[in-house]
Amino acid sequence: MDVSRRDFLKASGGAAVTGGALGGLAALGASLAPTLAQAQALRIEHARAVPSVCPYCAVGCATLVHAVEGKIVNIEGDPRSPHSEGSLCPKGAAIFQLHVNPNRPTRVLHRAPGATEWEAWDLERAIQRVAELVKTTRDETFIERLDNGKAVNCTTSIFALGGATLDNEWNHVQQKLLRGLGIVAIENQARI
């Protein structure tokens, strides 16, 4: 985004004037609460609210997902939640971006070692490549027994990093798979 110095000063000046005007109204005792409440009601007037959970951390704050004709139009904290009372952290407040962000990757991109350009791969090819690399690495580095004869059945050359945006069921299956492969370096910020 190209913003010239002049554009920046215009926007800053406009924001200062608007802020000063609103501050002056508030100092005179004018309340913007009714206007804000009406704007809030109009924003989600025809939306269907579906309760959900924030996917980012182990707290699991309750959210309300507002949808109009199957399209998400707003996500906010659920005021009925006993532990967050409708509040969300900055990451939770940005959940909407998981659904509407135009910069969100929607296809598999691969850059071969030494290459300078990304190549779009179909999902089957990417999954096959990951499976090949995991099998090869595990086969080459698997430790069945230590030098003293103690059975350990592990590989220390693969690290698994999971995310809290995955649901509990997926995280459970992922843990079972990784531990079954003998992977011991597992980190996951999830509710499991």
Image (cartoon, grey):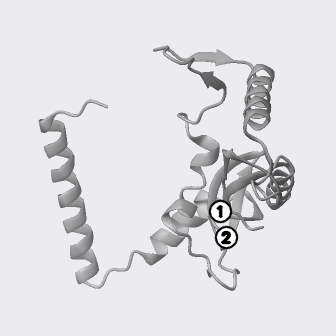
Q: In the figure, 96 relative to 60: above or below?
A: above
Quarter of the C terminus within the rendering: bottom right
Quarter where residue 49 is shown: bottom right
Which disc, if any, is residue 58? 2
Residue 183, position as x, y percentages in the image: 75, 50
Quarter of the N terminus within the rendering: top left
Quarter where residue 48 is shown: bottom right
**Disc 2, SS:** loop
Q: In the figure, 107 relative to 168: above or below?
A: above
Quarter where residue 191 is shown: bottom right
Residue 7 seen in the current view: yes
Q: Residue at x 26, y 30 (%)?
A: 2
Residue density around tag 2, few if under 14, some if 14–19, many if 20 or more, within 10 Å: few
Residue sitting nearer the eye, 18 or 184: 184
Residue 106, position as x, y percentages in the image: 65, 30
Which disc, if any, is residue 189? 1
Q: Residue at x 74, y 24 (%)?
A: 129
Which disc, if any, is residue 122? none
Q: Residue at x 69, y 85 (%)?
A: 82
CB within 8 Å, label 2 to label 1? yes
